[in-house]
Amino acid sequence: MNSQSYLRVFFASIVALTLNVAAQTASTPAQQSQSSYMPFKFSSDISKKGFFNTDAEWYGSLGFNKTYYQNSDIKITQPGSNYTINGVQGHDEYKTPGLRSPDNLRIGRFIDDERVWGFELSLDHDKYTSTLGQTANITGVIANNPSPGANTLGIGSNQLTSQTFSYMLHNGLNSLMVNVIYRKPLLGEIADNSSLSFIGKIGTGLAIVHPYNDIDGNENSVGQKTLSNVLGFNSGWWRIVGTSTGFEAGFRYVFKKPFYVELTDKQLFTEMSNIPVYQGSATQKLWSNQYILSLGYEFGGLK
C-alpha cells in the first residue's frame, strides 16, 4: 500500500471519528460556551491547578521506528550553481530493536474528564540516506557546465555514487512536534488492564537535522559537537531547517496497568531549507511513512 492509500485510510478514519464525536456532542446539551466550539470540555484540574498537575492522566513512552521515504527532489545552491537532483531515492538506516538508543520519545496528558482528548510532545529520531548507485536526472545550472562523469555531477542523467553525491541526514532527521491526541476505547475501560483503544494524532513542529554530505568530493563541515556548537539555524551540529507535520493512527493496549504498548502508522511531511552543503545550501521536501512501536507508562490521576 503506497502513501496516498495510507492517507486515504487515515482521513476516512478521521472523518468517521469526527462524525461519531459530533453525534455524541449533539445529543448532550452544551453546559458552557466552549462546548459550541470544541468537542470536549477541559477537565477542572486545569483551571484549578494549571496544566502541569498530577490529577490528570499522564503518560510517557520510548520506542522504535521503521521508516520508508518517497522519492524527493533535492535542490542545491552554490556559487555559480543552482540545480535540482530530481526524484532522489532515500532509505532508512533501520536496526533491529535491542540494546540501542530508541527512535522515538513521547510525553503527554489527557485534558478532559473522559480522558479521550489530550496533548503530546513527541520526538522522532529518524535517519535518511540517499541510496548509492541510483540514476537521477539533474536540471538547472552547474558552474563550468561539466558533463556527467564518474567523479562529477553534470546536467542530465547521473549515477549517484560516493564520489559524486553522498547525502545523509543522520543523528538524525529529527521531528520535534506538538500533537493533539484522540483516544477511543474499543475493548475494556480506558487505561485498565487488558484494555484496547484507538489512538489518533495530528501535529506539527520543528525539523532538526544533523547533515552530512559530499558533493563531487567536497565534504561539508558543521564543526564539532560542543556546548558552543550544539544547535542553531545557521550554525550548530544540529540545524533547525524547517517544519514537520504528521498524521498518525493506531492502537494502544494496556497489558498490565500502568504499562502499555502502542503501535501506530504515521504519515510525515518534512519541509527543509538551508541544509548546509559545501559552500552552499540544500532544500528538500520529503514525505515519509513510519511504523512506530513503543512501550509506555501511565501515571498521575488514573481512575
Image (cartoon, rainbow, N blue to C red):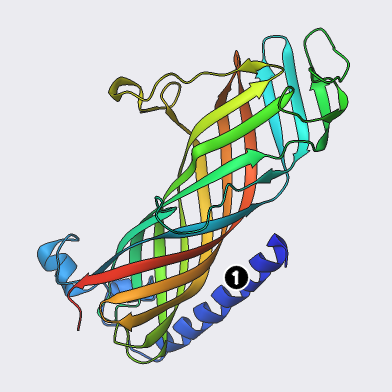
Q: Is residue 303 left or right of residue 220?
A: left
* Kind of element beneath mark 1: helix
Please name whichever residue, 125 or 56, is drawn nearer the observer in this view of the structure. 125
Regarding residue 83, the answer to whether it shows in the image is: yes
Q: Is residue 93 above or below residue 276?
A: below
Location of residue 164 in the rendering, given as x and y in whole percent from the top left corner: 74, 23
Give the quarter of the image for residue 272. top right
Front residue of 209/295: it is 295
Amino acid type at mark 1: Phe
Which residue shows up at 43% across the image and 71% down it?
262
Residue sticking out furthest to the top: 144
- The x and y percentages for residue 112 are 27, 75
Specify the quadrant of the image occupied by residue 234: top left
Asked whether, in this view, residue 90 is left or right of residue 100, the answer is right
Rendered-image quadrant of the N terminus: bottom right
Residue tagged 1? 10
**Image: 94 above or below 218:** below
Crowding at mark 1 (Cα within 10 Å: few <14, some 14-19, many 20+): many
Image location (x, y in percent) of residue 30: 31, 83
**How many numbered discs, if any?**
1
Is residue 57 something one can see in this rendering?
A: no
Left or right of 91: which side holds 245?
A: left
Q: Residue at 68% of width from left, 43% of height from top?
A: 90
- Residue at left offset 69%, top offset 61%: 3
Q: Height in image: 152 above or below 266?
A: above
* The C terminus - image quarter: bottom left
Q: Is residue 193 above or below residue 81?
A: below
Horizontal and vertical percent position of residue 41: 29, 75
**Picture residue at 26% right of the left edge, 72% below the top:** 298
